[in-house]
Amino acid sequence: MSADDRANREGPSPEGATSVRRLHNDFGELRGLSIWLRRFATRNAIDVETVASLELCVHEMVTNVIDHAYHDDELHEIVVRLRASADEVVAAVEDDGEPFNPVEAPPRPRPTTLDEATVRGYGIPILRALAQRLEYSRVDGHNRFSLAVRRRGTR
């Protein structure tokens, strides 16, 4: 079954427009994830600045799951949900990987030398900088991590 066959469920909800995409723990799925997210944004008149922040956040969330949540070579399902309201867009990622609460992750220490600086470890600080709200829960063996990005032009 292809990602597109597993993917798109859309419809209205009391809180706003929603869409669900199911993908596997495979970096090759990220391109389709971006296309789906941008189509959702277009259908819901989400401005380009909000889309850029949202896409970066969703990619970071899913990349972290693919990169860190699994310690086997098995195929796992990752579920991404989007919900757009008048003032924000909420992205939620659910996976069956190892428990990890990014909300409680300690802040990244600022490097004092070039030797201390690394190219990894900036994902959670990026999420914290771009999102207005981060939430995490562990339910029935699944991580559920969501964030809200405020739509530009709203207060």
Image (cartoon, rainbow, N blue to C red):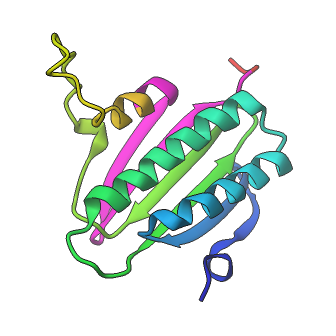
Q: Quadrant of residue 134?
A: top left
Q: Where is residue 58 shown, x and y percent of the image?
A: 52, 47
Closest to the observer: 118 or 64?
Answer: 118
State the residue in front, 94 or 124.
Answer: 124
The residue segment tinted magenta is: 128-152
Residue 87 location, quadrant: top right
Viewed as shown, does residue 99 lie left or right of 52?
left
Residue 22 in the image: state x and y as whole percent: 55, 71
Q: Nearer the viewer, residue 35 or 148?
A: 35
Q: Is residue 134 magenta?
A: yes
Work out whether 22 lies above or below 34: below
Residue displayed at 75% across by 53% down: 40
- Which residue of the protein is positioned furthest toward the bottom in this rendering? 1
- What is the quadrant of residue 60 in the picture? top left
At 42% from the left edge and 30% from the top edge, which residue is drawn? 126
Relative to 85, does residue 132 appear above or below in the rendering? above
Q: Residue at x 77, y 64 (%)?
A: 11
- Is most of the magenta stretch helix, strand or loop? strand
Quadrant location, the C terminus: top right
Q: Residue furthest front?
A: 115
Left or right of 85 in this view: 111: left
The location of residue 154, given as percent across then percent down, is 73, 21
User: Is residue 97 one of those drawn in magenta?
Assistant: no
Question: Residue extending furthest top?
Answer: 112
